[in-house]
Image (spheres, helix red, strand yellow):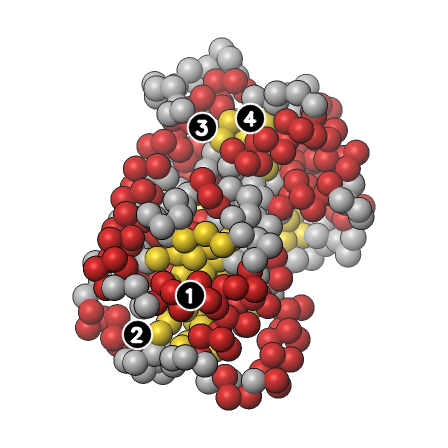
């Protein structure tokens, strides 16, 4: 084993691409680099010609940066995966990888395990959210899902809930390493001067008397789009309310919003979409002008947006899907709604907005402290170190064993 092992990470998306997978892959690659691993990332993209490979060392939070190889996708995954196999063989000849990381079970995890088996390398697969749920049920590929999880040397998951599902699928204890999302609390905080926040509200056309309901990320059905719209209408019936989408709406979901506004033309000015924000600090600023942050997911892993909202001292109202209850203690660090009762989201919002100011501030402070205590970079580093020791038993880092 080399003093600095070389790891290849496969991921469908990588920052600055949109979405939680891209952000978590970027953060994980940097965390691995800080542990002394030479990280190469292969990320698929539609911004290049099919089969085109472009490599660069991109700026990162780790010494020396991360080597990123972006590979143009073909029109279908069959061609893309076959071509990816050829590219992986060539990259291995060039860089002599010591292991392969698949970020998300499919397609990245499957390709990572398949290539690792071919090259005689250890592999690790990171399950991040609905990648398990999506492949379990038709038309998902259950056989490929279980093969990938079973053949990986080490499996990790974003939550304990997801780890339990993996154990059920495999019929055994997969000894999953839980790698929860973490937040940079120096960026996501609640200390921005009020004058700056007032300026931002004015920029979005939000009046001082409007309650602001925030959603952060890429809005789509999985994240509870219809329930957010219904809640906006219900809350506006009792008080002026704005729904602030900090991010974008998935293109194929635009029709849902258009249909809603046809039925509720009076709310056309009460829905604001910021568009994609490149800088996390800009996301943090937007979160701080929200009275509550909403995450009514129908299914999910453990969304980073929840932790970011909590780190900003916001009250988060979320469903109990996936690993969300592992981050939110109902009534103490936020509020949970059963995923079977999301039609009551508007009712829950009203109750939270009616809480005394002191109670709202208490919950917001508890939320931030919970993130500081349980979702920080030090815990992530220790757990990653433990995972790497399982992947490469002969290699040791100087970090302690992970927190339980």
Mark 1 and mark 3 lie on one chain; the one further toward the N terminus is: 1
Q: Position of residue 231 (x, y in %)?
A: 50, 70
Mark 4 and mark 1 lie on one chain; the one further toward the N terminus is: 4
Q: Position of residue 289 (x, y in %)?
A: 31, 68
Estimate the spatial distance between the alpha carbons at disc 3 and disc 2, rounded to whole Å. Answer: 38 Å
Q: Measured along the vertical axis of the image, is residue 249 above or below residue 313? A: below
Estimate the spatial distance between the alpha carbons at disc 1 and disc 2, rounded to whole Å. Answer: 23 Å
**SS for tag 1?**
helix
Estimate the spatial distance between the alpha carbons at disc 2 and disc 4, rounded to whole Å. Answer: 43 Å
Q: Which residue is mark 2?
A: 200
> Which mark's residue is nearer the viewer, 2 or 4?
4
Q: Is residue 45 left or right of residue 64?
A: right
> Which mark's residue is nearer the viewer, 1 or 3?
1
Q: Which mark is residue 349?
A: 1
Q: Are marks 3 and 4 in contact (CB under 8 Å)?
A: no
Q: Which mark is residue 176?
A: 4
Q: Are marks 1 and 3 in contact (CB under 8 Å)?
A: no
**SS for tag 3?**
helix
Q: Is residue 356 left or right of residue 384?
A: left
Q: Which residue is mark 3?
A: 384
Estimate the spatial distance between the alpha carbons at disc 4 and disc 1, rounded to whole Å. Answer: 36 Å
Mark 1 and mark 2 lie on one chain; the one further toward the N terminus is: 2
Farthest top residue in view: 394
């Amino acid at each position: 084993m080399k003093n600095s092992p070389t790891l290849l990470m496969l991921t469908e998306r990588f920052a600055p691409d949109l979405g939680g997978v891209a952000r978590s892959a970027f953060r994980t690659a940097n965390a691995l680099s800080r542990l002394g691993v030479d990280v190469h990332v292969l990320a698929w993209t539609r911004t290049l010609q099919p089969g085109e490979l472009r490599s660069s060392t991109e700026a990162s939070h780790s010494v020396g940066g991360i080597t990123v190889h972006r590979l143009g996708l073909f029109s279908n995954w069959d061609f893309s995966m076959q071509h990816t196999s050829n590219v992986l063989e060539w990259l291995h000849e060039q860089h002599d990888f010591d292991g392969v990381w698949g970020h998300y079970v499919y397609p990245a995890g499957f390709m990572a395990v398949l290539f690792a088996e071919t090259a005689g390398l250890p592999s690790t697969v990171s399950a991040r959210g609905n990648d398990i749920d999506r492949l379990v049920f038709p038309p998902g590929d259950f056989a490929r899902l279980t093969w990938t999880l079973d053949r990986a040397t080490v499996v990790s998951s974003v939550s304990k809930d997801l780890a339990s599902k993996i154990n059920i699928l495999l019929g055994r204890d997969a000894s999953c390493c839980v790698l929860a999302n973490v937040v940079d609390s120096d960026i996501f905080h609640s200390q921005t001067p009020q004058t700056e926040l007032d300026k931002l509200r004015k920029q979005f056309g939000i009046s001082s008397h409007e309650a602001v309901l925030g959603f952060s990320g890429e809005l789509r059905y999985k994240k509870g789009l219809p329930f957010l719209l219904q809640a906006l209408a219900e809350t506006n019936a009792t008080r002026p309310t704005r729904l602030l989408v900090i991010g974008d709406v998935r293109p194929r979901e635009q029709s849902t919003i258009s249909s809603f506004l046809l039925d509720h033309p009076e709310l056309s000015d009460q829905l604001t979409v910021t568009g994609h924000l490149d800088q996390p600090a800009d996301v943090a600023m937007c979160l701080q002008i929200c009275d509550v942050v909403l995450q009514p997911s129908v299914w999910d892993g453990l969304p980073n947006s929840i932790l970011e909202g909590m780190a900003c001292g916001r009250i988060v109202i979320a469903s109990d899907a996936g690993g969300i209850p592992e981050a939110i203690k109902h009534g103490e660090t936020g509020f949970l709604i059963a995923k079977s009762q999301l039609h009551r989201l508007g009712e829950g919002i009203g109750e939270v907005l009616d809480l005394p100011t002191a109670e709202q501030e208490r919950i917001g402070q508890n939320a931030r402290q919970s993130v500081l205590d349980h979702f920080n970079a030090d815990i992530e580093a220790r757990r990653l170190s433990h995972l790497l020791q399982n992947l490469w038993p002969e290699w040791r880092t100087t970090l302690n064993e992970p927190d339980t």
